Image (tube, grey):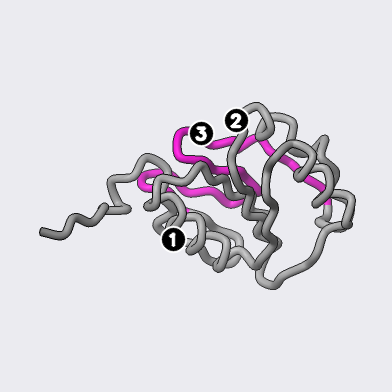
Amino acid sequence: MQFSRNQETEANAISACAAGLVRLRHREFTHSLIVTRTTVLDAWRPGPVDQLTIDDFKELLELAPEILLLGTGSSQHMPRPELYAAFAAHGIGLEVMDNRAACRTYNLLLSEFREVAVALLL
């Protein structure tokens, strides 16, 4: 017998991602946010991707995910190399992609019971 997990019942699974919009089960967001299995940091107000520093992720660091998926909008934009090094120093992997790819990857890793976070620049 095969079991599969219904993402619609996952606490913070992402059910929709479009330009300028992210929807969790019963909540919609039109501004940048960070999401984990148990936490939504919706007061996150980062600057442009090329100016991000580890200080922009203070609240996330307290949650200690294994990996952070950074969604940089409708297309992929790379942060400065220092941001990768700072996350590595905290034992957190950083992957950068566009928002739609970040949302899909987040849901996949969430379904595999990974400690994942997604930060979306909207």
Say which amino acid is labelled 1.
Ala
Please identify, in this view, whether the residue under mark 3 or under mark 1 is nearer the observer: 3
Q: Position of residue 111 (x, y in %)?
A: 37, 52
- Image quadrant occupied by the C terminus: bottom right
Mark 3 and 2 residues: CB-CB less than 8 Å, in contact? yes
Q: How crowded is mark 1: few (under 14 residues within 10 Å), some or many (20 or more)?
A: some
Q: Position of residue 105 (x, y in %)?
A: 51, 61
> Reading the chain from its start, which is encountered first: label 1 or label 2?
1
Residue designated by label 3: 39
Q: Which residue is drawn at 44% across and 60% down?
A: 16
Q: Position of residue 44 (x, y in %)?
A: 69, 38
Say which amino acid is labelled 3.
Thr
Give above or below for 60 relative to 75.
above
Apparent side of residue 28 relative to residue 47 in the rendered image (left or right): left
Please identify, in this view, whether the residue under mark 1 or under mark 2 is nearer the observer: 2
Label 3 element class: loop
> Reading the chain from its start, which is encountered first: label 3 or label 1?
1
Label 1 element class: strand
Where residue 16 is drawn, which disc sits there? 1
Q: Please identify the quarter of the rendering in which residue 43 is found.
A: top right
Q: Tell which residue pokes out farthest to the left in this image.
A: 1
Residue designated by label 2: 63
Q: Tell which residue pokes out farthest to the bottom in this image.
A: 75
Q: Residue at x 80, y 52 (%)?
A: 84
Q: Nearer the viewer, residue 112 or 30?
A: 112
Say which amino acid is labelled 2.
Leu
CA–CA distance in space, label 3 to label 2:
9 Å
> Which portion, as a residue range, is magenta?
23-47
Where residue 71 is drawn, which disc sits there? none
Please identify, in this view, whether the residue under mark 3 or under mark 2 is nearer the observer: 2
Q: Residues within 10 Å of mark 2 (few under 14, many from 20)?
A: some
Q: Please identify the quarter of the rendering in which residue 92 is found.
A: top right
